[in-house]
């Protein structure tokens, strides 16, 4: 397996007035291709910050983030956007679908940003929705879907773009137990069948039971790693 | 992206409708303004050219000449022949303006007696516009005279009374008696109180047999200012044919009014641009509020990989759609109304006399030119693009993580 992500001595400070908050205090981490990894830790441990930096959504205070052979922590705004568009899929805790678009249009949105023709992107988006059991809801808008259905559309949006890696920020946090479990199974399936690398931030024990690797984060530092027995 | 922009517009239905309606109203008003402005310009053009002719022919440097004899075109018949052959569809009218003293029973006034035989097209207009009593003169009438109503009052004469003109120092009889056959409303009281009209034959008999002081050439079919190049071209041709005379167009004869007419078009554009700037401020406000309400959403879109140019395109598209929708409605309504008015005419109650006092027709027939419709719609689209610049710039600079934390 090749290394997808390589994070070296990563630090991130936030300045609010005269107070400096150290969100990450020097994180080292490697993610291999095809991993199904959770970054776990309590609220404020730096999980989301780490995920944002791995997703080129933010710049670190110091340290390095490498995606394959590209150092991504120093990219310009437009280079970062391009990298995210073509390489990384995102799933957010709050689903973050575009409310005026249907499930199909949401799933096809990243492809539209890539300039893919309408017919082609709709075909791909329909396949992604079908893979997540959402075909019959393709024409519904987010406010006509349950939380679990919205999160499936969000995963379909990430999946339709066929990214090398999907970063998911607490994807099951807003879902009930059954819906959360179903979503985890779907993502496991995508990981195993399609070889998509998943990295989650979570403190959901249901999700932690299903991942292959858990990276523990506390106060902005990696405090340990484990491989759950069920994985 | 168009679908997304269109649906985003209607998330705040009432606000978008008000803004789009304001743009539509501006387009509607700008079309009416162009239509009315164009009608006024053509109305002024017609009145002006009816009064002076499209072209006049004088002796050279006539403005500096004080001596009546030196103003005369003595070989009027040959000049007229040249003009008739070179004027094309224009109607040539010789005019002899004689300075003199007009006396009634008890009173006298210094006047200009204008000898002319109006061509049919002008005669009807003169009859309709200026004659307030009696009749017009027939060609070759040696006994009748038309007086400005103010002049008749000043001399205390009425229709049917006899008056006497003394024109000493001229080349004709120098004095003659006439009967008042018509009274004229000449709009300008000063002009009216020193104007009398004779037939050309009568004026020539009085002051200068066979001569005129100038020729006027009227092109009755030229009703619109934009067609005026025909007259200007004809002026150049006639000047070449008559090198010993001064051939001037109505533009040369009325420089200050021409300046006013020429400024009218640009002035309408400026006023319209001001309208659109005001509408643009409303559009900026709408687009910016819409952005503020969707900061989080833009954060998500940027995090999914949208580049700054994608965001600029999205916001500009929304703004342009907002303006184009309004512009389409405003254009349709404006053109429908103008189409109706162009057929049936528009008379503004209470303003008939005001327009008449300037010699303008009281009924307007507004019409717009295709390029003015394009200007109005173009202004609306430009307003949409310009109004989006600032909000789009703000949105394209959003940091995705900060934007996603934002709640409106």
Image (cartoon, helix red, strand yellow):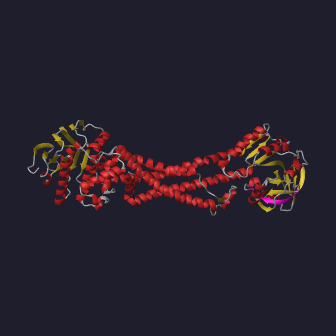
Q: Nearer the viewer, residue A14 or B77?
A: B77
Q: Residue at x 46, y 51 (%)?
A: B280
- x and y, in percent, of residue B124 in the image: 76, 58
Residue at x 13% of width, y 42% of height: A222
| Foreground residue among B201 and A10 | A10
Of all residues, the one furthest to the right in this rendering is B173
Residue B192 x, y percent position in the rendering? 76, 55
| B380 to the left or right of A59 | right
Quadrant location of the N terminus of chain A?
top left
Q: Is residue A64 left or right of residue B158?
A: left
Is any part of residue B345 visible from this angle?
no
Q: In the rendered view, does A94 fall on the left or right side of B293?
A: left
Q: Nearer the viewer, residue B168 or B137?
A: B137
Residue B301, image x and y in percent? 31, 49
Tell me the residue at 84%/57% (across/down): B138
Q: Is residue B139 visible?
A: yes
Q: Is residue B263 left or right of residue B17?
A: right
Q: Is residue A78 magenta?
A: no
| Label total for image | 0
Residue B182 in magenta stretch: yes
Question: Which residue of the protein is positioned furthest toward the left in this rendering?
Answer: A229
Residue B258 in percent (x, y) is at 66, 46
Is the residue A54 above or below the residue A210 in the image?
above
- The answer to which image quadrant residue B368 occupies is bottom right
- Residue at image position (45%, 50%) is B384
Segment tinted magenta in the rendering: B178-186
Q: Main secondary structure of the magenta part?
A: strand
């Amino acid at each position: 397996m090749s290394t997808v992500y390589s994070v070296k001595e990563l630090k991130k400070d936030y300045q609010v007035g005269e107070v400096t908050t150290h969100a990450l205090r020097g994180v080292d981490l490697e993610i291999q291709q095809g991993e199904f990894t959770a970054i776990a830790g309590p609220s404020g441990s730096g999980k989301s910050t780490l995920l944002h930096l791995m997703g080129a959504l933010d710049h670190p205070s110091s340290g390095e983030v490498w995606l394959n052979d590209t150092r991504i922590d120093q990219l310009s705004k437009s280079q970062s956007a391009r990298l995210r568009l073509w390489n990384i899929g995102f799933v957010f805790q709050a689903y973050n679908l575009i409310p005026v678009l249907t499930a199909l249009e949401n799933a096809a949105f990243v492809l539209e940003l890539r300039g893919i023709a309408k017919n082609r992107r709709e075909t791909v988006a329909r396949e992604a929705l079908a893979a997540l059991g959402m075909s019959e809801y393709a024409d519904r808008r987010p406010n006509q879907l349950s939380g679990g259905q919205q999160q499936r559309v969000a995963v379909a949006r990430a999946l339709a773009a066929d990214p090398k890696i999907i970063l998911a920020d607490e994807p099951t946090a807003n879902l009930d137990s059954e819906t959360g479990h179903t979503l985890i199974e779907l993502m496991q399936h995508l990981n195993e069948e399609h070889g998509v690398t998943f990295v989650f931030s979570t403190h959901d024990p249901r999700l932690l039971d299903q991942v292959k690797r858990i990276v523990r984060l506390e106060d902005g530092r990696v405090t340990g790693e484990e491989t759950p027995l069920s994985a | 992206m168009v679908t997304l922009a269109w649906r985003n517009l209607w998330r705040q239905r009432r606000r978008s409708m008000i803004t789009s309606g304001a743009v539509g109203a501006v387009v509607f008003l700008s079309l009416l303004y162009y239509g009315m402005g164009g009608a006024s310009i053509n109305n002024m053009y017609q009145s002006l050219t009816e009064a002076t002719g499209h072209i006049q022919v004088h002796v050279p440097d006539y403005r500096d000449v004080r001596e009546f004899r030196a103003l005369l075109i003595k070989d009027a018949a040959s000049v007229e022949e040249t003009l008739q052959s070179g004027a094309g569809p224009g109607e040539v009218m010789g005019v002899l303006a004689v300075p003199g003293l007009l006396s009634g029973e008890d009173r006298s006034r210094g006047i200009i007696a204008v000898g002319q035989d109006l061509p049919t097209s002008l005669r009807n207009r003169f009859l309709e516009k200026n004659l307030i009593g009696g009749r017009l003169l027939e060609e070759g009438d040696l006994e009748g005279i038309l007086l400005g109503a103010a002049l008749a009052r000043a001399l205390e004469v009425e229709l049917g009374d006899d008056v006497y003109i003394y024109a000493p120092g001229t080349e004709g009889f120098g004095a003659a008696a006439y009967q008042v056959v018509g009274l004229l409303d000449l709009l300008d009281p000063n002009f009216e109180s020193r104007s009398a009209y004779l037939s050309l034959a009568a004026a020539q008999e009085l002051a200068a047999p066979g001569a005129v002081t100038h020729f006027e050439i009227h092109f009755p079919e030229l009703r619109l200012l934009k067609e005026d190049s025909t007259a200007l071209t004809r002026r150049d041709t006639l000047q070449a044919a008559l090198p010993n005379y001064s051939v001037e167009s109505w533009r040369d004869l009325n420089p200050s009014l021409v300046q006013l007419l020429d400024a009218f078009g640009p002035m309408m554009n400026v006023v319209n641009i001001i309208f659109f700037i005001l509408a643009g401020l409303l559009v900026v406000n709408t687009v910016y509020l819409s952005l503020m309400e969707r900061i989080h959403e833009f954060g998500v879109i940027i995090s999914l990989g949208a580049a700054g140019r994608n965001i600029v395109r999205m916001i500009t598209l929304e703004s342009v759609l907002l303006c184009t929708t309004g512009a389409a409605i405003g254009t349709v309504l404006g053109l429908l109304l103008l189409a109706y008015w162009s057929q049936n005419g528009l008379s503004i109650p209470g303003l008939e006399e005001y327009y008449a006092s300037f010699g303008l027709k009281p009924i307007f027939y507004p019409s717009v030119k295709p390029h003015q419709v394009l200007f109005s719609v173009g202004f609306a689209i430009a307003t949409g693009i310009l109004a989006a610049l600032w909000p789009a710039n703000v949105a394209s600079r959003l940091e995705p993580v900060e934007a996603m934390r934002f709640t409106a």
